[in-house]
């Protein structure tokens, strides 16, 4: 940023903020808030989290030093952060819960069923910046959507979007937690919103329901145990101790949101970009495991799923097939990739097959006589 805030002396910042909120709603954001850039408390929590090694192999969480918690170091001249919320729940939560109970089908985290949210939100935040430019002329800003060292949850909390719950997701008291966050760092000295405070109270539903006990204490997530980390962020073999708990979750996990009492207020989003694509909301595991890399690339075009790569996709599906009910179809699907070129994939397929031994198969067949 190169523009001095002195040039905004004649601008009614309160009126401009009201306009920005209105423009944001027109562009499809459900909420717009403004915060200052003092993240001292969040910086301390981040340092403690990193010191505990809870970030696992996500080295990027410490790679940029204090730029993550000090916006003015990341973008010199930043005076305020405009945070936005965009709801994404594509279907009822009951449908998602039922899917978790169907071990023949794949569970994909609800945020990844539609178009990549990075692209959707980045484009609309840029459109919001253009609206501001049209109104006041050139100003200093940068757009971020989970694409740089930004403490987006702490900023959203300060902007009044919601509070960081015990599961470390942001919760809005009227709309739950099924939403994306995006930021516009700016040199505009806009009026700030009142920060939200926690309303989790004594509830520990998210901690109790976590399949791998990843929420090790209120507001503390050990990513190394989290299914989202294990199936998306981690490029290593999934630790055997967590494989049964993963169930049919092949990309991410939503349990801490699905069973959060505050999400009784959440409603499905009407955003077309977040509607499920290629039947991934009801897909059979055997079908997905049979996809060639070419098919996978076609089916995941424009999706956040692309980030994990084909090999890790198969790794995740192999674990889910190992957790499925034994059937000829499941065993045949696994045996079809038993001699995978990748040593890691072959090991996961071998583990999955070991969950379907002949004794189980015979018992299954006897049950149907």
Image: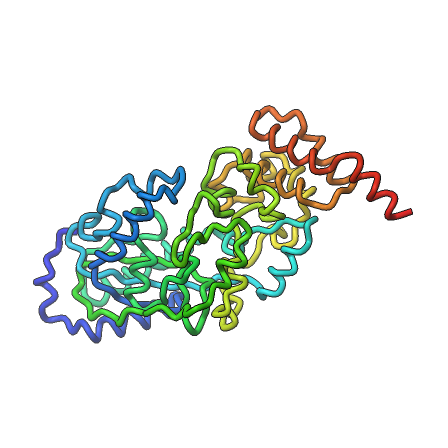
Task: Determine the image quadrant of residue 362.
Answer: top right
Instruction: Give x and y (percent) for residue 257.
Output: 50, 61
Residue displayed at 53% across by 67% down: 268
Residue displayed at 50% across by 42% down: 230
Q: How many numbered callouts?
A: 0
Q: Residue furthest right?
A: 369
Residue 176 shows up from this direction: yes
Task: Tell me how the rendering is colored.
Answer: rainbow
Task: Determine the image quadrant of residue 137.
Answer: bottom left
Residue displayed at 49% across by 60% down: 206
Instruction: Give x and y (percent) for residue 209.
Output: 54, 58
Residue displayed at 35% across by 67% down: 161
Instruction: Give x and y (percent) for residue 347.
Output: 60, 29
Q: Is residue 356 above or below residue 18?
A: above
Lateral position of residue 212 relative to residue 29, left or right: right
Lateral position of residue 249 relative to residue 6, left or right: right
Instruction: Return the residue nearer the eye: 279 or 203.
Output: 203
Instruction: Return the residue nearer the eye: 12 or 339.
Output: 339
Instruction: Return the residue nearer the eye: 356 or 154.
Output: 356
Residue 302 shows up from this direction: no
Instruction: Give x and y (percent) for residue 179.
Output: 44, 62
Instruction: Return the residue nearer the eye: 14 or 230.
Output: 230
Q: Is residue 210 above or below residue 198?
A: above
């Amino acid at each position: 940023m190169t523009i001095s805030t002195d040039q905004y002396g004649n601008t009614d910042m309160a009126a401009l903020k009201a306009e920005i909120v209105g423009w944001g709603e027109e562009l499809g954001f459900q909420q717009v808030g403004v915060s200052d850039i003092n993240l001292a408390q969040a910086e301390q929590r981040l340092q403690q989290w990193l010191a505990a090694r809870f970030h696992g192999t996500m080295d990027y969480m410490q790679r940029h030093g204090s730029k993550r918690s000090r916006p003015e170091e990341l973008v010199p001249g930043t005076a305020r952060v405009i945070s936005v919320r965009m709801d994404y729940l594509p279907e009822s939560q009951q449908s998602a819960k039922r899917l978790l109970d169907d071990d023949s089908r794949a569970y994909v985290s609800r945020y990844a069923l539609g178009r990549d949210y990075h692209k959707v939100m980045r484009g609309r935040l840029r459109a919001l910046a253009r609206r501001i430019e049209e109104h006041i002329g050139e100003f200093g800003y940068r757009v971020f959507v989970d694409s740089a060292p930004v403490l987006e949850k702490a900023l959203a909390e300060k902007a009044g979007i919601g509070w960081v719950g015990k599961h470390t997701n942001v919760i809005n008291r009227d709309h739950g937690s099924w939403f994306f966050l995006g930021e516009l760092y700016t040199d505009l000295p806009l009026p700030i919103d009142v920060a939200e405070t926690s309303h989790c109270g004594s509830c520990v539903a998210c901690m109790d329901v976590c399949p791998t006990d990843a929420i090790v204490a209120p507001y503390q997530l050990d990513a190394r145990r989290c299914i989202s980390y294990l199936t998306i962020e981690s490029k290593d073999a999934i630790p055997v101790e967590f494989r049964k708990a993963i169930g049919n979750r092949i990309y991410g996990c939503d349990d801490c949101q699905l069973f959060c009492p505050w999400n009784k207020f959440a409603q499905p989003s009407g955003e077309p970009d977040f509607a499920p694509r290629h039947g991934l909301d009801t897909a059979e595991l055997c079908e997905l495991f049979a996809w060639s890399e070419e098919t996978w690339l076609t089916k995941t075009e424009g999706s956040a799923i692309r980030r994990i790569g084909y090999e890790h996709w198969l790794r995740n599906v192999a674990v889910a097939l190992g957790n499925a009910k034994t059937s000829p179809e499941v065993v045949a699907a696994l045996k079809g990739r038993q001699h995978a070129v990748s040593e890691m994939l072959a090991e996961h397929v071998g583990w999955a097959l070991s969950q379907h031994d002949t004794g189980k198969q015979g018992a299954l067949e006897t049950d149907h006589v």
